Amino acid sequence: MLRIPRIVPWTSPQEYQQVYEWLYSDSLNLRELGIKRVKAWSSRGKVPQAIVCTSAFVEVSLRDEFGKISNHELRLLYSMIFIRHVPTLPSHPIPSLRRFVNGLVDQIQGNYAESVASLALKLDLPLWFVELRHAGTHEHLPSLQVLRNGCQQALEWLNRDYWTTQKPFDSTQLNEIRSLISKYKEIWKKYLKAIFFSVSNPSEKASAYKVVEKLLNLISAEYIKDLLVPILLENGFLVPKGKRKRASVVNATLSDDLIDVWFPMLERFDSEWSIFGDELVQGMLEILVSDEEFAWSKSASSSFSLTIVAWISYFLRLSYNSESKAFKELDREGILEFCLRKPTTYTNKILQLMTDFDDELKES
């Protein structure tokens, strides 16, 4: 079943990874960029507590490094993160800093109340963080040095127990996949051109397939959605950079050249991963409805979006074709539901195509 669009505040895994690198950078400017981006995420939707906590600790540590506020104010700011969500000092108006200990343990609190300490143990959260929270709440504020050490260790804990468990994609891996796809395109276009002039070299065909096999070995099924599909949908791959090579209002279908270049690779992916077709179409649909208001106002001459529609239509035709073996597991009901839930100029075109092919839809 196709998913309703994923609701996350970041636009791509790459943006998520970039913010992580910014927050843990040695550069003050990059850390400040990371804080601003997390605040932007918060305005878009719900942000994981661990990300909010990381940003809060980095923000206070930056204020500490700039040295523009008193030690007492710093102790208050550090303590607030370890205690709970409270307003910041009126004389220094910044967004309220989220709770750290409470915010993390609240997420696993069940129907029966457990102590913060017992919940912290379940999270593998150092108990002295709980002690800092208790001291800041019920006793004298901890010393600035203790709070600084606590902040540093909290950032290390968040890095180890949250960020590094999210399986982020490093730029080297992304670039390698992008490079291999570009290499496949280059070799296969050369092979097709040679066929046209009746001088084809079988070794070129074999080289292209070797590149595809490298991609299959490099990417596991769990990364199709967040890694392979976004790269395939970058400008210059499934959607050509040249607008003359794209679909248009006059000709809303894919060119034979575009299909000839990309279908062998897509067909191999489809045979290797049963989920590939659905994930690719899902990614395409999300592009078409990524900004609903903008999608409605766009002229139907948007060649990028029309090419995406043409690819979805092509896959649907294959799935309806009894003689075709490719994209047979495409979730047509899921596509139908998605387009009905998210009506735009482009999803309506897809609905029209499905109606043309499906007798039951014609009657409904």
Image (spheres, grey):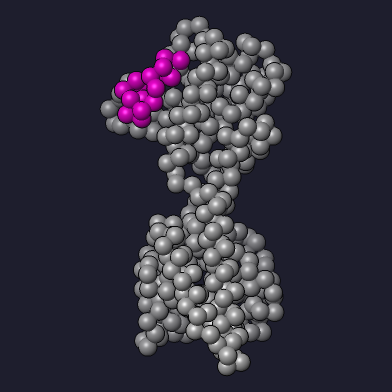
**Residue 202 within the magenta-colored segment of the rendering:** no
Q: Magenta stretch: dominant SS?
A: helix
Residue 270 appears in view:
yes
Question: Residue at the location (34% across, 20% down)?
Answer: 117
The residue range painted magenta reads: 116-132
Question: Residue at the location (59% across, 74% down)?
Answer: 186
Quarter-of-image position of residue 276: bottom left
Left or right position of 342 against 249? left
**Residue 127 within the magenta-colored segment of the rendering:** yes
Q: Position of residue 308 (x, y in %)?
A: 57, 72
Residue 332 appears in view:
no
Q: Position of residue 286 (x, y in %)?
A: 53, 62
Residue in the foreground of this view, choosing between 361 and 152: 152
Question: Residue at the location (50% across, 75% down)?
Answer: 207
Left or right position of 287 against 330? right
Q: Residue furthest left?
A: 112
Vertical placement of residue 261 versus 14, above or below: below
Q: Position of residue 196 (x, y in %)?
A: 59, 91
Question: Residue at the location (67% across, 19% down)?
Answer: 90
